């Protein structure tokens, strides 16, 4: 079940134009009345991590719901708001990660066709805003930032949802998160030159000295990455994305499967038997931009990625190359530019070399 394109656009326009009045209960009831939705005094919708009033929409994709500041104990991030999000399911595809990614992509294309590129896009990873856990299939999002409120296409557990939210709480939460293990930001955030992003603050990244912490963070990124970049439509834009391990470059390709490619620029290349023993396969992957790679990893289909195995392959290869700490690793040049977006890869704990 999904909303027809015309219905989706009309709903998105009405949400963007809505008067939210400080996100008080009085304002939210007025907003619901204006949309023709019925306020339900039920606080346990099927999305059980979200406690708040349910709004009976009459849409084929199901009811909307509000998130309550009080019930989520997030008062420290708000300035008078009683609610900090209105969520509306827009597509409920079959229970399959690729189907959910494709549903997200369809909705995103419709919205971008009407509103232009989203001012912010990315993947939340874990923790998500206000310490939510990500959906099991991934956590891609596209956000059209407004003056005081933003419209967002996000990943719900059942499929894509529209989210109308005040800027203050979510941006305050993001800015104030820990920049160190074990509760640092995950995922990646990309911003473009949209004037709507003026004044937007982005926290710095984080690093670790611990190989196990790095491996866990990398595994978390890789496990859902092919589904997420498919949903965002940026798989082909990751042309230069890779990790720099001294004289080794490990490139990631997600179109249409996730593969790692190893380019060895050491004066004395690492021994092939040892690389093969780690799990590398001889020969380059299909990706054109790494045609000079001598080795590749096994291929992983979207929704079926062994992130831990791939992360361990990277870590073991770095250590074989003599690296003592993940702090000696960087992103290859241009990895932080994805299409028209400048991207910070929080979940990888890495940035481009200074």
Image: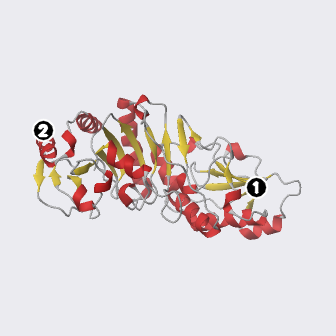
Q: What residue sits right under mark 2 in the picture?
A: 34
Q: Secondary structure at mark 2?
A: helix
> Horizontally, is 206 left or right of 327 in the view?
left
Q: Is residue 306 visible?
A: no
> Horizontally, is 150 left or right of 273 in the view?
left
* Dot 2 crowding, Cα within 10 Å, few <14, some 14–19, many 20+: few
Displayed quadrant of residue 177: bottom left
Q: Residue at x 51, y 66 (%)?
A: 182
> Horizontally, is 271 left or right of 35 in the view?
right
Position of the C terminus, as image quadrant, is: top right
Q: Residue at x 75, y 51 (%)?
A: 293
Query: Up-down: is 85 above or below 15?
Result: below
Measuring from the top left, give residue 73's x and y in whole percent.
28, 61
Camera-side residue of 185 and 58: 185
Q: Which mark is residue 62?
A: none
Looking at the rendered structure, the number of numbered marks drawn on it comes to 2
Between the residue at mark 1 and the residue at mark 2, the CA separation in whole angstroms equals: 60 Å
Q: What residue sits right under mark 1 in the picture?
A: 283
Measuring from the top left, give residue 300's x and y in whole percent.
58, 60
Q: Secondary structure at mark 1?
A: loop
User: Does label 1 or label 2 sit earlier along the sequence?
Assistant: 2
Measuring from the top left, give residue 294's x and y in whole percent.
78, 54
* Dot 1 crowding, Cα within 10 Å, few <14, some 14–19, many 20+: some
Q: Residue furthest right?
A: 268
Measuring from the top left, give residue 111's x and y in whole percent.
36, 36
Q: Is residue 253 visible?
A: yes
């Amino acid at each position: 079940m999904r909303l027809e394109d015309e219905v989706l656009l009309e709903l998105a326009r009405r949400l963007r134009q809505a008067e939210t009045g400080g996100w008080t209960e009085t304002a939210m009831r007025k907003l619901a009345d204006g949309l023709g939705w019925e306020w339900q005094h039920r606080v346990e919708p099927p999305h059980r991590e979200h406690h708040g009033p349910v709004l009976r929409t009459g849409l084929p994709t199901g009811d909307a719901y509000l998130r309550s500041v009080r019930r989520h104990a997030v008062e420290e991030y708000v300035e008078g708001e009683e609610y900090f999000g209105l969520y509306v399911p827009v597509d409920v595809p079959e229970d399959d990660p690729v189907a959910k990614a494709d549903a997200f992509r369809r909705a995103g294309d419709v919205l971008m066709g009407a509103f232009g590129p989203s001012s912010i896009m990315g993947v939340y990873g874990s923790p998500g805003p206000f310490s939510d856990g990500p959906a099991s299939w991934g956590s891609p999002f596209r956000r059209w930032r407004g003056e005081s409120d933003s419209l967002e296409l996000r990943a719900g557990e059942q499929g894509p949802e529209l989210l109308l939210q005040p800027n203050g709480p979510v941006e305050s939460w993001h800015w104030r998160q820990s920049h160190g293990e074990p509760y640092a930001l995950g995922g990646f955030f990309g911003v473009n030159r949209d004037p709507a992003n003026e004044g937007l603050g982005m926290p710095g990244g984080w690093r670790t000295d611990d190989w196990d912490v790095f491996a866990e963070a990398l595994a978390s990124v890789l496990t859902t990455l092919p589904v997420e970049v498919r949903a965002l439509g940026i798989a082909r834009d990751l042309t230069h994305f890779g990790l720099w391990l001294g004289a080794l470059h490990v490139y990631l390709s997600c179109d249409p499967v996730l593969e790692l490619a190893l380019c060895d620029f050491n004066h004395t290349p690492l021994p092939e038997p040892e690389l093969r023993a780690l799990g590398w396969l001889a020969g380059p992957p299909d990706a054109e931009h790494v045609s000079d790679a001598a080795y590749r990893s096994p291929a992983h289909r979207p929704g079926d990625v062994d992130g831990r195995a791939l992360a361990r392959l990277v870590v073991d290869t770095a250590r074989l190359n003599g690296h003592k700490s993940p702090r000696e690793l960087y992103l290859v040049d241009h990895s932080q530019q994805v299409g028209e977006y400048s991207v910070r890869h929080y979940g990888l704990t890495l940035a481009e070399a200074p």
